[in-house]
Image: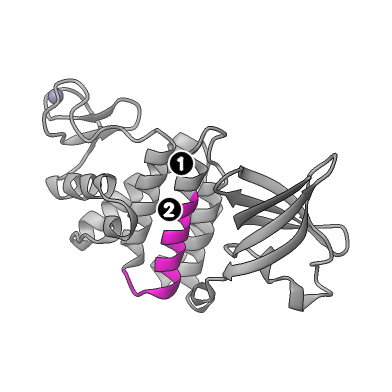
């Protein structure tokens, strides 16, 4: 059976001497694992589609076992990422997070979020920290694990965020303190689609604080400590 689909490489690992096993995120089939033959180290010219982040159109053959790549046409390789260590590390974190998405995820929405975020990281000078905030927030919304940004008990303006219980106002519960500026940013992100979601501003301290909080929340909901995130943070400190 032949399957024709767009896909972004989330993970690529060697398999035998010259083959690779790719984890793809596809809009129609969700996350799938495919075997890419003869793309290993000896054939440098043909391996572009088998690298992380690369977005291609695939023709796959499904036999008894896993999908096998028949052909692949690269749509976008996000070359810009390779020129900036910090943005490259962030892109790696984005695909690692996408690889944790659930079986019920709206894969088309996640593909579009990932592509938009990689494009902005690779081809624009938009503040990468804002791209990260949007990616993490939207990821949690798509996964159905982002709470409504009002007090979960009384509906008032929230002032705290509890990872277990959601947002709450000053009176109704406990959690990490959040400011009105951060609430506005989270509402802006959740209420806007496409590139518009990334267009907002916040002061440096708030960006730093909210970025840490959202990463911790993504770790919490995926039950994962992301090595790529630790690497990204170590770069931000030394750069
Ligand atoms: Zn309340």
User: Is 176 rendered above or below residue 108?
Assistant: above
Does 198 sit left or right of 99 as displayed? left
Which residues are drawn in magenta? 111-126
Quadrant of ligand 1 in image: top left
Q: Is residue 233 visible?
A: no
Does 85 sit left or right of 131 as displayed? right
Q: Position of residue 168 (x, y in %)?
A: 19, 29
The residue positioned 17% from the left and 47% from the top of the image is: 184
Disc 1 secondary structure class: helix
Q: Quadrant of residue 7?
A: bottom right
* Secondary structure that dominates the magenta span: helix
User: Is 100 rendered above or below residue 39?
Assistant: above
Assess disc 2: are there few (<14), some (14-19) or many (≥20) residues with their C-alpha within 10 Å of its C-alpha. many
The answer to whether residue 85 is magenta is: no
Q: Is residue 15 visible?
A: yes
Does 165 sit left or right of 78 as displayed? left
Q: Position of residue 203 (x, y in %)?
A: 18, 61
Q: Quadrant of the N terminus?
A: top right
The residue that mark 1 highlights is: 219
The residue positioned 37% from the left and 39% from the top of the image is: 141
Q: Nearer the viewer, residue 88 or 112?
A: 112
């Amino acid at each position: 059976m032949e399957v024709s689909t767009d896909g972004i490489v989330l993970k690529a690992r060697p398999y035998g001497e010259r083959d690779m096993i790719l984890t793809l995120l596809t809009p129609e089939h969700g996350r799938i694992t495919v075997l890419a033959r003869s793309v290993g180290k000896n054939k440098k010219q043909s391996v572009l589609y088998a690298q992380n982040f690369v977005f291609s159109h695939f023709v796959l053959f499904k036999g008894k076992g896993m999908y096998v790549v028949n052909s692949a046409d690269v749509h976008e390789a996000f070359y810009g990422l390779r020129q900036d260590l910090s943005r490259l590390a962030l892109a790696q974190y984005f695909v690692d997070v996408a690889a944790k998405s659930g079986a019920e995820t709206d894969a088309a929405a996640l593909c579009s979020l990932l592509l938009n975020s990689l494009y902005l990281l690779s081809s624009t000078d938009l503040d990468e920290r804002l791209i990260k905030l949007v990616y993490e927030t939207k990821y949690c919304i798509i996964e159905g694990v982002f709470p409504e940004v009002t007090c979960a008990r009384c509906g008032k303006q929230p002032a705290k965020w509890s990872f277990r219980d959601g947002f709450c106002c000053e009176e109704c519960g406990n959690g990490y303190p959040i400011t009105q500026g951060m609430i506005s940013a989270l509402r802006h992100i959740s209420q806007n689609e496409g590139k518009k979601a990334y267009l907002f501003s916040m002061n440096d301290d708030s960006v730093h604080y909210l970025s840490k909080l959202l990463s911790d929340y993504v770790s919490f909901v995926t039950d994962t400590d992301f090595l790529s995130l630790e690497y990204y943070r170590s770069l931000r400190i030394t750069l």
